[in-house]
Amino acid sequence: MPDLAEQIRTGRLIDSLGSAGAFYDLHYVETTSSTNDDVRAAALRGASEGLVIVAGYQSAGRGRRGRRWWSKRGQGLTCSVLLRPSLAPAASHLLAFAAALSAAAAIESCAHVSARTKWPNDILVKGKKIGGVLVESRVAGSQIEAAIVGIGLNHYGRSGDWPQEVQERAITLEAAGPARLPSRGAMLATLLVELHARYLGLQSDGGDDLLAEWRQRDIVLGKQVTVTLGSETVEALAVEVGPCGELILEGSNGVRRTVTAGEVTLR
């Protein structure tokens, strides 16, 4: 089977997307600092939504809060997608939900391995992080002018390939032990089809179906959690996600609080 780069460069991968293929403009780069940075630059030049840049290796990939996204060359699936949604800036969480849910669905469809999500943007397999999403938006007035949706999945390799601080909390698709390990091309094609469907749904219903799907797949809701908010730590019950994807917490005193960002761990 052709490798990921060849599938993209020859157009075979875009041809496999069916009707969703018309939405995407797919490009491959062997090495880059960050696919999110590449897509942002293209957005500033006026690129249309649907631009996707896939990298064989990122030298400065990042996750939320500026953390490094660690991946060895050729082992991960890393891409960024340009979207121009008709959404208020507060709803950017919903784009992260759409991407994380699409990645989880692709894992289950291609590898037949159960996948869950964790607020606000993680994808988990066997209780460990297999991927994450980083959405960076450019706002004009009361609307999102451009949203760069970065998605990273750990595909090939074993945890021993990673730094010690990563090994205990992360997993690759290969290490998850699927009966048959799908190629990165198959995973990417399925992920993009899934994302396109959820994006169209979000544009039409404002996120109702997306939120319902998130509630079913998220491991945090209904659990006692610790949320780190900068220098503040909150212990509470995660009771719900709001209409824009914000997390609603309930303290032991019954008082509810809404958070839009933070590091969540199960207690």
Image: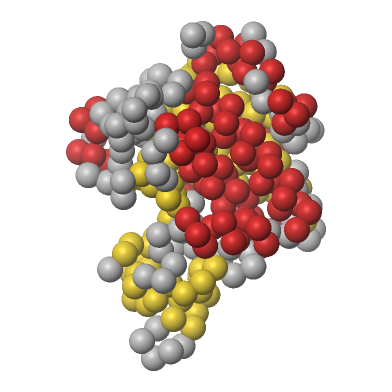
**Residue at (59%, 27%) from the top-left corner?**
189
Q: Position of residue 89 (x, y in %)?
A: 69, 58
Q: Is residue 128 above or below residue 58?
A: below
Report the front residue among 265 and 63.
265
Here the colouring is secondary structure
Visible residue check, residue 145? yes
Q: Quick one: which residue is furthest to the bottom in this view?
A: 253
Report the front residue among 143 and 194.
194
Viewport quadrant of the C terminus: bottom left
**Residue at (40%, 83%) from the top-left corner?**
251
Q: Position of residue 217 (x, y in %)?
A: 47, 56
**Residue at (51%, 71%) from the top-left corner?**
240
Q: Quadrant of residue 197?
A: top right
Q: Position of residue 12 (x, y in %)?
A: 64, 13
Visible residue check, residue 63? no
**Residue at (46%, 36%) from the top-left corner?**
107
Report the front residue among 49 and 118.
118
Report the number of numbered marks.
0
169 left or right of 84? left
Q: Is residue 195 above or below residue 258?
A: above
Q: Position of residue 169 (x, y in %)?
A: 27, 46
